[in-house]
Amino acid sequence: MLYDNSRPRYLPHLAHPEVLQMGLSPLQEKPWIETDSDLGRYHRHKHRQRERYGERVYRADPGSTAAQRELARRLLGHLTGEQAHLYRLEEGTLTCETGGFSVAVDDTEALWCCSLWVADDLVIMEKRGSEYHLTAASLCSPSHWQLEEKFGRPMREIHDPIPGFHRKLSPSIERFFDHLRPEHPVVRYNWSLQAGGRLSQRPEETEDCPPDAALFYRTERQSLMRLPQSGAIAFTIRVYLHPLETLAGISGALPALFAALDTTPPALARYKGFDRLAPAVSRYRRVFPSP
């Protein structure tokens, strides 16, 4: 199925207005990877980011090779099986006509290679001792974090900067990681706002936000899957961006978003940049007043 990305497909703030929440649900019959007409844009974006930032967008511990290759094999099977109408494999090259690209299947940098097949960023977490560590990632569209700061660190340290995270979520996440089974992958969604339409929200790429700035609703669709052979946990992270005004045509979407912004705790609001966006948000409130 080729999805239409012209309007928001997910509005997680309607079900979970709080910014910090696990919100896990079984993947079940939902597609593992979603492919739409924007795929070529993400493919080109990844090449540009790698050229510009190098190992700041792709990095892998040598010990993660088995997990990378396992994820690549699984992803290749998914794309050439469930999405065979979009992808074809011929003589070691995977072609996607919808995305307008062909990629040689190469396990030298297995995670980077397979990340070029899809719009999603890919992250691998592996247990080292008693904790899960970030051991490999192709991260070209981060949401206000930097791979070079998080690489190799355990899950708890990765989330240290987020106000209230440990109190609310860390124990639940640690239990979930320990109990995630290969046959039960899950999906979750995050939401946020940003000024401008950049896919990558590295801190140094964050745009200024004057009162007349164009705001975008940002959603992350994350899937989490246990890889049965390596035991690693694979994340897929797909970012969707839509101009904020597109929510005006969806009943209750903008009023619920404004209410969610108003109830976000101040420290978390500052971390997410909501305070910086406030003048522009006020303009949208005037243009699209709540009923």
Image (spheres, helix red, strand yellow):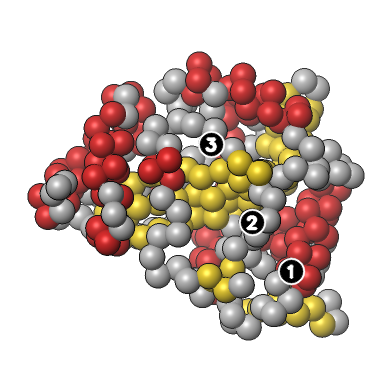
> Percent from the top left, x then y, of residue 23?
53, 36
Q: Label 2 belongs to which residue?
A: 30
Residue furthest right in the image? 229
Residue located at (58% from left, 22% from top): 170
Name the amino acid, label 1.
Glu
Q: Amino acid at mark 3?
A: Gly
SS at circle 1: loop
Labels 1 and 2: the sequence-earlier one = 2
Q: Residues within 10 Å of mark 2 (few under 14, many from 20)?
A: few
Picture quarter with the N terminus: bottom right
Q: CA distance from mark 2 to mark 3?
A: 15 Å
At label 2, the amino acid type is Lys
Residue at numbered disc 1: 82
Q: Which mark is residue 23?
A: 3
Q: If you read the primary sequence from the N terminus, does the residue marked by circle 1 or circle 3 appear first?
A: 3
Extreme left residue here?
Answer: 286
Position of 233 relative to 238 (above/below): above
Q: Earlier in the sequence, mark 2 or mark 3?
A: 3
Looking at the image, residue 191 sits to the left or right of residue 153; the answer is left
Helix, strand or loop at disc 2? loop
Judging from the image, what secondary structure is the residue with disc 3 in? loop
Q: Observer-nearest residue: 267 or 86?
A: 86
Residue at 29% over, 43% down: 257
Disc 2 + disc 3, Cβ < 8 Å: no
Measuring from the top left, give residue 233's x and y in whole percent.
74, 40
* Residue 98 appearing in the image: yes
Residue 35 x/y as whole percent: 59, 68
